[in-house]
Amino acid sequence: MKVEFYKHNLDIKDIQNVVDVLKSTFLTTGNVVSDFESQFAEFMQAKHCITTSSCTSALHLSLIAAGVTKDDEVITTPLSFIATANAIEYVGAKPVFVDVERDTGNIDASLISNKVTKRTKAIIPVHLYGQLCDMKSISQIAKKHNLVVIEDAAHAVESSRENYVAGQYSDLSCFSFYATKNLTSGEGGAITTNNPKYVTPLKKLRLHGMSTTAIDRYSKKYSHYDMDVLGWKYNMTNVQAAMMVSQLTQLRARLEKREKIAQRYESAFSKIKEIELIKVLPNSNSARHLFTILTKDRDATLHKLQQRNIGVAVNFNPIHLMTYYKKKYGYKLRDFPNAEYIGAKTITLPLYPKLTKIEQDYVIKSVIEDVVI
Ligand SMILES: *Cc1c(COP(=O)(O)O)cnc(C)c1O
């Protein structure tokens, strides 16, 4: 048996929408992108959505739009994909890490205030594995110190906590539509915001700083473009957007399927003393993006599972222990014990709607056999 780490859910309708764009004139950023932007904004209960080429570019542009620049400090978590900290590096600012909660893996809001200095400009919380951070506390800290909050919501399209979703207690919220994310266009990203002041700058920044776009010149009276700020080439194409418009209507049903699988995993593994699980808090509905177990001898278990043809991943080896960050800032082992604890033990298991019962059983049986020896 072979169990893939991830299988996407693109159906006939998604594929047909892409084919329709391929048969049309306009392949790059145009009407399909704008349609997706309004639908995604509505889905996230946000006023505005600006699509980008990735979550990494979304984070980069959000930091620029928020005025974060050279020598500023940005508080974030060490337990994330490197993109979160790399985006901070792109603008010349310093990522200042704060340790995570041992049971959820999310940034520990109670430790943030201690790390605020005169140079701190922003906080980037990451909703790890699909569970929202304590955004109410984080936004209060931000208000007190006049900081911008930018969410890394790459795992959090369907998440909720108490009565809020991603993007409601922050200035800007960044999403990823990378190949293995719950909503995907292979590569892609988006920023949502309720503050209209960010919309025009972000739209300019994602396309070289140009004052008019190709679709404007194509569909309206020709007008020359000017460029008054330096922007990037971070726009989403109509082909990518077409892949996602009808996926939006499937997200709830797919979450239910992942929730069932996650609960099966949890009930099987909670009986095994060699396995620890990430806690989903009672006030929280996880988007169930990644299902991870914590094991003692992680690498041995990881390799055994791989030998059984089960797709696995590590989310994440902490960012502060990456050579670049160690060298540049002198971060070292024991700086962030909880992030290191999870980072050293975590294994991500297959979790997607197409994962069959037989495959789930095989994963469960294999994991238990491999950790209990
Ligand atoms: C996937 C991911 C990103 C990067 O997303 P891209 O769209 O690939 O740039 C950023 N942060 C987290 C937490 C992620 O999992």
Image (tube, rainbow, N blue to C red):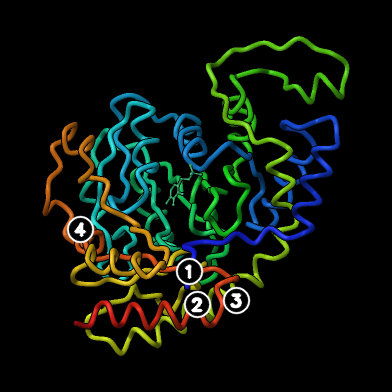
Residue 17 image offset from top left, x and y in percent? 80, 49
What's the CA distance linking mark 1 and mark 3?
A: 20 Å
Query: Looking at the image, which residue is at 52% across and 38% down?
Result: 58
Query: Looking at the image, which residue is at 19% across and 71% down?
Result: 296
- Classify residue 297 as left or right of residue 7: left
- Classify residue 246 as left or right of residue 339: right
Q: Mark 3 points at which residue?
A: 256
Please count the marks in the image.
Answer: 4
Circle 4 sits in a helix, a strand or a loop, which is it?
helix
Q: Mark 2 points at which residue?
A: 359
What's the CA distance linking mark 3 and mark 4?
A: 31 Å
Residue 310 image offset from top left, x and y in percent? 41, 68
Dot 3 crowding, Cα within 10 Å, few <14, some 14–19, many 20+? some
Is residue 83 visible to us here?
Answer: yes
Dot 2 crowding, Cα within 10 Å, few <14, some 14–19, many 20+? some
Query: Looking at the image, which residue is at 50% across and 32% down?
Result: 61
Q: Name the residue under label 1.
A: 3
